[in-house]
Image (cartoon, rainbow, N blue to C red):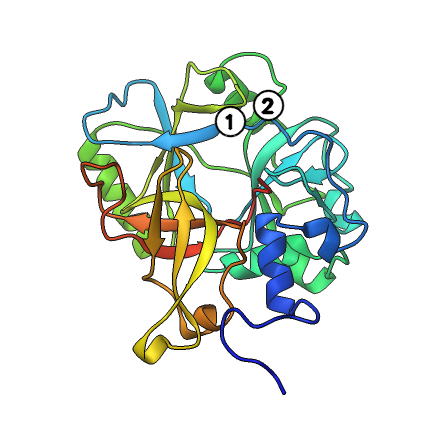
Amino acid sequence: MRATGPFRPLLRPSRRTLLIAALSGVALNALVPGMARAATPPSLMLADVYRRGMSLDDYWVSEKYDGVRGYWDGKVFWTRGGERIVAPAWFTAALPAIPMDGELWAGRDRFALAVSTVRSQTPNDTAWREMHFMVFDLPAQPGDFTTRLTALRKLLPIPAAPWVVAVAQQRATTHDDLQALMEKTVKMGGEGLVLHRGASLYRGERTADLLKVKPFDDAEARVVAHLPGKGRHADRLGALLVEMPDGKRFKLGGGFTDTQREDPPPVGSLVTYRYNGTLPSGLPRFARFLRVRGDVAS
């Protein structure tokens, strides 16, 4: 007899559990033997959050593509968490032997397809033909971002690899213009915008030289425990107990589908949640589950 509820023992991981574990990197090598990992994850530039009132002087603005962060080291692709991405040979054959930072993207509102395609250790040609490598930086190129952007525009496009695309950049102007562009992008199915300061050097850290602009706040937290549900959610997930990077914990109970409550993100996985500001305690207000992170392993 098959046990029910989020705490049922598993004799073998389901396909969905494998995918979730792959997304978060939890016990990934145990679930997918032989999956390659880098000794050290790539040192990538990470975005802070844009707030009204911040100066927009010298910033470039582009769409924030909702895919899987992909780092091309000149030979192979890696995720942000340091896992090897196995792309078909035809996808990478014409790529230059220089590092490129970008997003492996399947199109707007197709995040799940991007994740499943990138995470498969046996590349699916049909799925990969839906993918684009949206390149937004050249980490090893000398100079500031504006200089690197000039080099990127000279490097791309590559006629033999039209799926490798330089992300379109334009100069940011005012807050109102930025909000109008963000709203237009979201209405078309985009995730938001990214601001990149022209004078910034490429540094592998979270920095205000790179800012994300979204219609809501979001953040990440680690799953600590599954809390049982009540009423209509009896015998399945009621909420996740999650821990923020500063060690604070809270219950994340909203935003889940029935399927996710039946088979919740594993303990130890990293999830993204939406929220509306913070309480005096520093905890998020009105937090809702968004998804399991797809490009980090720790």
Q: Which residue is mark 2?
A: 139
Q: Using the image, tell me which numbered label, if any, was put on residue 172.
A: none
Pointer 1 with pointer 2, Cβ within 8 A: yes
For the point 76% across and 51% down, the residue is 88
In the rendered picture of this protein, how many numbered marks are placed on residues? 2
Q: Is residue 277 above or below residue 170?
A: below
- Kindly state the secondary structure of the residue where label 2 is placed: loop
User: Nearer the observer, disc 1 or disc 2?
Assistant: 1
Locate residue 231, reporting x and y percent: 30, 78
Q: Residues within 10 Å of mark 2 (few under 14, many from 20)?
A: many
Instruction: Judge from the rendering whether residue 210 lies leftward or rightward of residue 176; answer left or right.
Output: right
Q: Is residue 236 visible?
A: yes
**Identity, as a three-letter code, of the amino acid under mark 2:** Pro
* Residue at the spot 53% in from the left edge and 19% down from the top edge: 202
Q: Residue 45 — which label? A: 1
Q: Quadrant of residue 169?
A: top left
Q: Secondary structure at mark 1?
A: loop
Q: Nearer the viewer, residue 157 or 237?
A: 237
Position above or below: 275 against 198: below
As drawn, which residue projects farthest toward the bottom? 1
Q: Nearer the viewer, residue 185 or 53?
A: 53
Q: With respect to residue 173, does 131 lie above or below? A: below
Which part of the image, by quadrant, shows the N terminus? bottom right
Give percent across and percent down for residue 222: 47, 46
Against 172, residue 18 (above or below) is below
Q: Is residue 196 visible?
A: no
Label whose residue precedes the other's in the sequence (1 or 2): 1
What's under tag 1, amino acid-wise? Met
The x and y percentages for residue 256 are: 38, 65
